[in-house]
Image (cartoon, coloured by chain):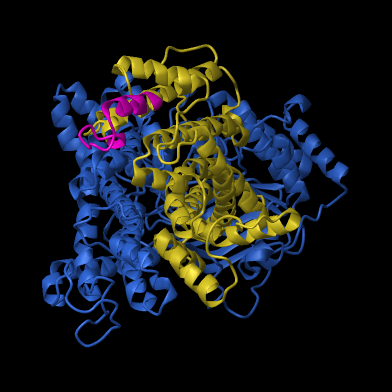
Chain colours: A yellow, B blue
Amino acid sequence: MGSQRRLLPRWRHRGVRLVLQYALVVAVAVVVNFALPRLAPGDPSDYLAPPEGGTISLAERQEMLARFDLDGSNAQQFSTYISKLFQGDLGISVRDGHPVTEVVGDRIGWSLLLMGSAVLISTVLGVALGFAAGWRRGSRRDLGLLSGVLTVDALPAFFVGLMLILAFSVHLGWFPVYGAVAPEGLSGWAWVGDVAERLVLPAVTLTCVGLGAVFVVARSAMISELGEDYVFMARAKGLSDRAVRRHATRNARIPVSTAALLGLSTLVGAATVVEAVFSYPGLGSLAFAAVRSRDYPVLQAVFLLFTLAAMAINLLNDLLYPLFDPRVRKVGT
Amino acid sequence: MSRERRRLLRPSTLAIAATGAIFLVVVIGAAVFADLLAQHPPDRASGAPYQSPNSDHWLGTDDLGRDLWAQLVHGSRVTLLVGLVAAALATALGTLAALVAGWWGGLRDAAIMRLVDLVLSLPLLVLVLVLAAYFGRGQTVLILLIAGVLWARPARLLRAQVLKLREIGHVVAANALGAGAGRILRTHLLRRLVPLLSSQFVRAALIAVVVQSGVAFLGLGDPGQVSWGSMLYFANNASAILTDAWLWWIVPPGMALTVLIVGLAFVGFALEELSDPQLVSHGPAPPVRRRLDPTEPEPPPADVVLELRGLAVAFGGTEVVRGVDLQVARGRMLGLVGESGSGKSALALAVMGLLGRPGRVTAGATMFEGRDLRRLGREGLRRLRGRRIAIVPQAAMSLLNPTMRIITQVTECAASPASGTGGIQPTGAVGEVAERAHAALERVGIPRDRHRAYPHELSGGQRQRVVLAMAVLNRPRLLIADEPTTGLDVVTQWEILDLLDELRAEFHFDVLLISHDLPLVAARADDLAIMYAGRIVEQGATGDLVARPQHPYTRGLLNAVATVSGPRRRPIPVAGEPADPRRLPGGCAFAPRCAHRSEVCSDSDAPLRPLASALVACHHAPLEAPEPGAAGTAGGPGNAGEVAT
């Protein structure tokens, strides 16, 4: 991806060009991130301390603005923002006064756990089902899988979450409903077991969200590979169905890996809702809470984090591509 | 290898489209007739709170005493409105970006596409939430925000399409004729983009509905609007899940959203299938065993390797091979010649059991090694392929898997299971199998240090050599070469055919050589069969047939060839268009193009009958010796003999 598009001059080395392109995008994202709350109607300082609210004095207000780096001109604020950013300082949460890095750090692990398991399951399942459906396009199996997966995919995440809670927590009592880990301090295997138990329902919900996209791409990749001449040749050689399928699968992986990686963003968005339903302490519910309380330093941090993650995923995709496709392995051309 | 490809709206796609359309109609109907369907207001209390369903409140009431049925019916309006308006905006925006990026290219393209990449990879819902935090929670703001992040997907897909269309001839032509850019965009591009546009619009509407309901469920939607998402928000806040109220408070809006989204997804899927240019039928059709005569046909004499008896092949309702009798005799290479569309490739594929859907063998027998191949079944045929009968298809440059090393692909032939359906059953030890593969590759002239190369690292000629290596590896009895040199340059063509001759002498297999190129085949084959519109029209020993062609079509083919030696003569192409198998004339299929035609030709098809040493299917054979240079049909027999050299 991006290999034909050239925003920067033609560098000898593809890697250098890629990194520069991504650096540029990240820089844009940082600027947007800084500008957004200031461009929006109403000044961020108004949210913090209404000037005519009367609850605090002018001096207190000034002190408060300084605390959140909102004093001085926009240029001054920007330079403070950038220099602090490079020091890894993302400011202070308006809601609870803790450093944003700490607040985010507490959540990121849970998010990675939840997202990771959902991505893993939905990719494996989606690819397997998609290849199976595409292998015999138009068959009864294809039709069944297709309409089934599209329907599961259409169920709103929060609805699935609520129904799962209803069935498995409220009525069957198999899984705890809320949080990522029991409040009382567990340790060792008990802790792992508890975390796993609480992970099941949100992960299943999130898997439902991610399944459809992977399935559809895997299915159409399989269909399009089966039309290729090399598959015809494989059949003409007298290979078994299994061997023919292996041929097609090798090539179908290429678009599927790209789609799976780029589909991650949908999953992150859905995670916000899912985490809210299950009160799961991830970044999604943090973003949600920050939106509700207008905790914009946290909001900015989450936004920046998501942007960086998105860039990292794109970069990963660019780097992984040659692994699956020997045709693009030649470096520097 | 002209595999038949045709557009089909599959019944499965139709069923999905119809289901989706019904779902959408239900939701749209609810939105349109909301006032008639619900007698209570959706946004004001109309009774006591927390009522169970009763005759007045069909779905009960919520925590504020509002009628849930009214909310359900009216909720469709908000959800649909946000979905459709946001999708329309996003599609328009995306189209504009795609046109600018794809048409003008350069820096504008690069900048737009990087922005698209960024927007696409950001989590949509979070983006909308964050932006909503800054810009407010009104419905209009929400629509604008959703459109503002949704445009990227259509933009990317449409841009790819614009780039493709830009290269298409008539757009280029219009450009060269000096038509303004604006006119080109209007008349050509937009019209061709419409299929993709409509599927993208539906897709965008789906995402917009998902985002809107998510925002509303989180309680961040427009507080003044009742939507399905907001119903669930209130239900969740009131812990409806812990009481029986879930049944009438949570399930109805959840199901309503599902119905809408499934409807959009199904309709979108069907539209995507329709706009997909690759609507192709793949894979061998399941063998049709019905109506086979229970008695096994008589085996041919021992010196016949392959015998076709009345073979007929149809694609859908169109017969492309219409009763072909043909013999490949031991030790004699048979050349099968015909224009593209004459059915010669379909014939080869039918023998191999490789016909793609909707093609199938409708009649006849294929005798090989004493058995009728049609009675072998799918698995039996598979085991024969590559072992007893090998095929070298058209040199399409893409016969080898681009992601596998060539040695792997050759070894695979040697190692493929000789029996059973299960796992790999090498015909020898692993080392021995690999050694055979290496030897075969070296035999066809691929040096050992190239064996681990990928196909894209080889030239076209080398690739076809690899295909030959795969074909002869298992020492087949018969090799079907179907246009084996098409797409190669002339020198390489002859090299490949020379190699084929060498291998044939060395491995003692017989060859059915199929091509549209009469001189090329005539130079190699011992016998010739000329095919027209799914039938053999003339057949005989190569020398006789070239020297004394008896069928007008054969004469036409010979006249269409330029000769190097002999009297100078201009090549004369066969007059008229090749027969369309879907609209064959009654009687002789060649009659419309034939200078010798008479009434009898349109009345009845001429059977293949012996004439001198050959077989001819023409009412007028034997033809009188033609006067030299007669257009369309005649060729000097004297110089036709030179064609071969």
Relative to B548, does residue B235 appear above or below in the rendering?
below
Residue B375 locus on image (x, y percent):
63, 70
Task: Please tell me which residue is depicted at 48% across the width and 18% down the height of the picture.
Answer: A20
Residue B305 highlighted magenta (yes or no): no
Residue B393 locus on image (x, y percent):
57, 44
Give residue B352's quadrant in the image: bottom right
Residue A198 or B113: which is nearer the viewer? A198
Residue A55 highlighted magenta (yes or no): yes
Residue B176 locus on image (x, y percent):
20, 22
- Which region shows up in magenta? A47-67
Q: Is residue B192 visible?
A: no
Relative to B153, does residue B84 appear above or below in the rendering?
below
Left or right: where does residue B189 sit relative to residue A68? left
Relative to A202, does residue B121 appear above or below in the rendering?
above
Q: Is residue A87 visible?
A: yes
Task: Please tell me which residue is depicted at 40% across the width and 47% down the height of the picture.
Answer: A289
Left or right: where does residue A39 sit relative to residue A258? left
Residue A69 or A139: which is nearer the viewer? A69
Return the residue found at the far bottom. B55
